[in-house]
Amino acid sequence: MKIKRLFSAAVLVGLVGFAGGAALAQTTDPLVGTWKLNVAKSSSSAFKSGTSKIEKAGAGVKFTVDLLGADGKTSHWAFTANYDGKDNPVTGNSPYGDTVALERVDARTTRIVSKKSGKVTTTQTVVVSADGKTRTTTTKGTDAAGAAIDSVAFYEKQ
């Protein structure tokens, strides 16, 4: 009888551990990681290179972005935001604006709305591939200077 109880307890502990691990795996944000811009696969020639570091931050994420423009100018900016559609301040020199709002569209898709002085400048749709190795960022709108943007940037996870 004791052996049956020990075996049953061991099976129960194993099942709980497996279910807990599966639940944890499902809550992992596919955006989290370091991403490198692949200029050759991107539709815009506005940037020579770029990286994005995305870290888990509470119920949301922290983005740190570095881009080298085709004109030689560098851009470095960061923000921390939840997926709640609320505006969050951007620090640094983002070409898109001074606030961002994030919304989760589905498990692998995020919408980022940037604003400058309260006015929407760009809407970005970020899609992480099913295997988690690549992401595309489609940007539509205008940059902070008012120039039109309609581009797709292709990133590879590092």
Image (cartoon, rainbow, N blue to C red):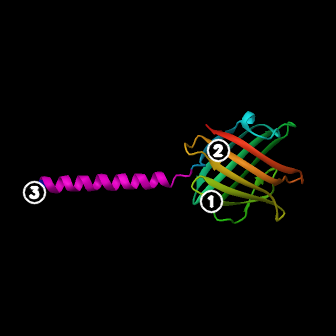
The answer to whether residue 155 is above or below residue 92 is above
Looking at the rendered structure, the kind of residue marked 2 is Arg
Residue underneath mark 1: 104
- Measure how far apart labels 1 and 2 are at the Cα level: 15 Å
Q: Residues within 10 Å of mark 1 (few under 14, many from 20)?
A: some
Residue underneath mark 2: 135
Which residues make up the magenta segment? 3-29
Query: Disc 2 on helix, strand or loop?
Result: strand
The answer to whether residue 17 is above or below residue 40 is below
Query: Disc 1 on helix, strand or loop?
Result: strand
Looking at the rendered structure, the kind of residue marked 1 is Arg
- Locate residue 60 relative to residue 116 in the image: left or right: left
Residue 153, how many percent across, how many down? 73, 43
Looking at the rendered structure, the kind of residue marked 3 is Met
- Measure how far apart labels 3 and 2 are at the Cα level: 55 Å
Q: Residue at x 16, y 57 (%)?
A: 5
Q: Residue at x 76, y 51 (%)?
A: 139
Res 23 quadrant in image = bottom left
| Disc 3 + disc 2, Cβ < 8 Å | no
User: Of all residues shown, which one is farthest toward the left?
Assistant: 1
Of the numbered discs 1 and 2, the one sitting upstream in the chain is 1
- Measure how far apart labels 3 and 1 are at the Cα level: 51 Å
Residue underneath mark 3: 1
Q: Residue at x 74, y 33 (%)?
A: 40
Query: Disc 3 on helix, strand or loop?
Result: loop
| Disc 3 + disc 1, Cβ < 8 Å | no
Q: Quadrant of the C terminus?
A: top right
> Mark on residue 76?
none
Residue 17, how many percent across, how many down? 35, 53
Residue 82, how many percent across, how many down? 63, 61
Q: Residues within 10 Å of mark 2 (few under 14, many from 20)?
A: many
Q: Is residue 11 magenta?
A: yes
